[in-house]
Amino acid sequence: MKTSTLIAAIAVSFAAAGTAFAQEATYEMPQPVSSSLSRAQVQSELAQARAAGNLLVTEADYQKGAPFSSQLSRAEVRAETLTAIANGEVQRLNSEHNAFSVMISGAKPESAVRTAQIGR
């Protein structure tokens, strides 16, 4: 097969592939918008929404939730943390559950408790 024939065959296949994905372009005429509210009413609603804090502008505004407040004191949280370390719960949370887990030799919950108590 000649090189020119091969190039022509490749060009024809690319042309056929390009037309397979082509679609007819359509243009939808814009539809007229009719509002039942006056400009003054819209501005009034906007002012009310701003005053109430209901004006959602960005994606972050949509994701706002109630602020978190803990019912425990700092000492209670520290005590729960030290208990979780001593029971090995923290180590289980941080461990991998697959064949590629690497166990650090000598890492025991007791050493973590001692380290946490030293930092007091």
Image (cartoon, rainbow, N blue to C red):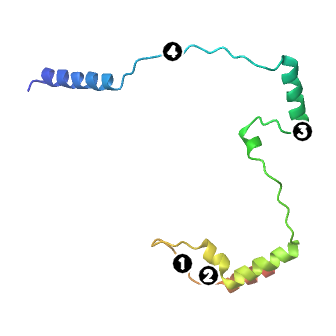
Type of amino acid under label 3: Ala
Type of amino acid under label 2: Ala
Residue 77 relative to residue 18: left or right:
right
Point out the tag, 2 or 4, that comes first from the N-terminus. 4
- Label 1 to label 4: alpha-carbon separation: 63 Å
Q: How many marks?
A: 4
- Label 3 to label 1: alpha-carbon separation: 54 Å
Asked if the residue under mark 1 is in contact with the one under mark 2, i.e. CB atoms within 8 Å, the reply is yes
- Label 2 to label 1: alpha-carbon separation: 8 Å
Type of amino acid under label 4: Tyr
Between 67 and 83, which is closer to the camera in this rendering?
67
Residue shown at 50% from the left, 73% from the top: 101
Which residue in the protein does label 4 denote? 27
81 over 10 or under it: above or below:
below
Image quarter (top left, top right, bottom left or bottom right) of the C terminus: bottom right
Point out the tag, 1 or 4, that comes first from the N-terminus. 4
Residue shown at 76% from the left, 77% from the top: 81
Which residue in the protein does label 3 denote? 52
Crowding around mark 3 (Cα neighbors within 10 Å: few <14, some 14 to 19, many 20+) is few
75 over 30 or under it: above or below:
below
Residue shown at 88% from the left, 19% from the top: 40
Point out the tag, 3 or 4, that comes first from the N-terminus. 4
Type of amino acid under label 1: Met
- Label 3 to label 4: alpha-carbon separation: 41 Å
